[in-house]
Image (cartoon, helix red, strand yellow):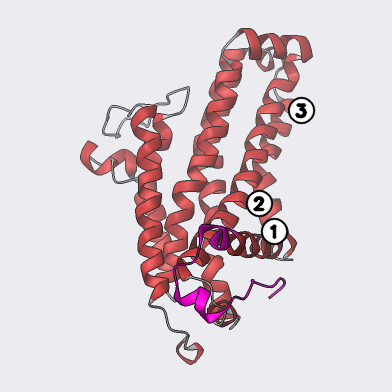
């Protein structure tokens, strides 16, 4: 392991550990996991993958009609379509799958998870610390992706016109909404993929099922739509798009319902993951 987790006496471990002790252990694991994710050579491909949507807007600025590039309504619709179709459904989804599944699964495959289990750290603290390290990484990376794409979409309008649209028009609300949706997407999808990494030796099949379930959400009846994460995220978008002629229309939920629902889902999923990891026994011969 790249950094040490604090070790305490048997009396401290067996007794009720104070919150300050859990917090120090959380910080130690969090820092260790952040270094693993950010400094890993494999992460280079993740960074490139996250920047792909910006290429579309660079191409848009170079090759599109300049008159359209200063049309706020046109630009807002283009960004909304790219955001929902590419950034949210592809970049954030698959980016979170890579980050969160590997939090446990990669260590099991590399035969290093037992180092954590040999230290006197509550496994619930381990799960929560790993989750928040993944959430910090994903939120930071995909927030940069979202905000950079927004910068590129406003760039052709010029500085003064863009500032006026942002602060005197709906621009600031749009920016905050898309940024918040990106973070919430990491919150919801991250917890699901961490759970898949804990439960399944080969998470590819359940992850594929989850993607297909999210992909066909527009065909699901309203009751089943509530069992998808994308339904709550789409409900928060400032510009509503048509889902096509075959879509089953459902009323979007309000932010007061969507945001708590995603946090509640995350809390439930993390609780299940904690229970699984608490009973987990390492046997690399079976992996």
Give the foreground label among 2 and 3.
Answer: 2
Name which residue lies at 65% across and 28% down: 150
Relative to 40, 168 lies left or right: left
Residue 85 horizontal side relative to residue 7, left or right: left
Residue 140, given in percent of the width and then of the height, sits at 65, 45
Residue 147, horizontal then vertical, whole percent: 66, 33
Over which residues does the magenta segment extend? 1-23
Q: Is residue 117 something that shows in the picture?
A: yes
At numbered mark 2, what does the secondary structure look like: helix, strand or loop?
helix
Q: Are marks 1 and 2 in contact (CB under 8 Å)?
A: yes
- Residue under label 2: 49
**Closer to the camera, 139 or 79?**
139
Q: Circle 3 is placed at which residue position?
A: 62
Local secondary structure at mark 1:
helix
Quadrant assignment, res 217? top left
* Residue at x-position 67% and y-position 25%: 153
* Residue to which mark 1 is pinned: 45
- Would you call the spot at circle 1 few (<14 residues within 10 Å), some (14-19), or many (20 or more)? few
Image height check: is 234 above or below 129? above
Q: Position of residue 71 (x, y in %)?
A: 63, 12
């Amino acid at each position: 392991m790249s950094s040490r987790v604090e070790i305490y006496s048997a009396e401290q471990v067996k007794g009720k550990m104070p919150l300050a002790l859990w917090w120090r252990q959380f910080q130690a694991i969090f820092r260790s996991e952040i270094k693993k994710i950010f400094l890993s050579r494999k992460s280079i491909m993740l960074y490139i993958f996250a920047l792909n949507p910006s290429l579309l807007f660079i191409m848009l600025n170079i090759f599109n009609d300049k008159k359209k590039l200063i049309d706020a309504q046109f630009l807002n619709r283009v960004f909304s379509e790219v955001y929902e179709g590419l950034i949210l459904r592809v970049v954030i989804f698959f980016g979170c799958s890579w980050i969160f599944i590997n939090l446990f699964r990669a260590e099991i495959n590399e035969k290093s998870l037992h180092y954590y289990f040999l230290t006197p750290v509550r496994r619930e603290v381990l799960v929560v610390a790993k989750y928040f390290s993944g959430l910090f990484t994903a939120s930071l990376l995909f927030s940069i992706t979202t905000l950079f794409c927004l910068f590129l979409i406003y760039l052709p309008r010029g500085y003064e016109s863009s500032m006026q649209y942002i602060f005197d028009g709906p621009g600031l609300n749009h920016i905050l909404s898309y940024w918040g949706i990106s973070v919430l997407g990491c919150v919801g999808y991250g917890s699901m993929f961490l759970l898949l990494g804990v439960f399944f030796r080969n998470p590819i099949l359940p992850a594929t099922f989850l993607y297909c379930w999210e992909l066909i959400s527009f065909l699901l009846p309203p009751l089943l739509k509530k069992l998808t994460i994308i339904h709550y995220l789409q409900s928060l978008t400032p510009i509503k798009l048509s889902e096509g002629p075959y879509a089953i229309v459902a009323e979007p939920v309000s932010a007061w319902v969507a945001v708590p629902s995603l946090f509640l889902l995350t809390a439930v999923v993390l609780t299940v993951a904690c229970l699984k990891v608490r009973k987990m026994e390492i046997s690399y011969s079976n992996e």
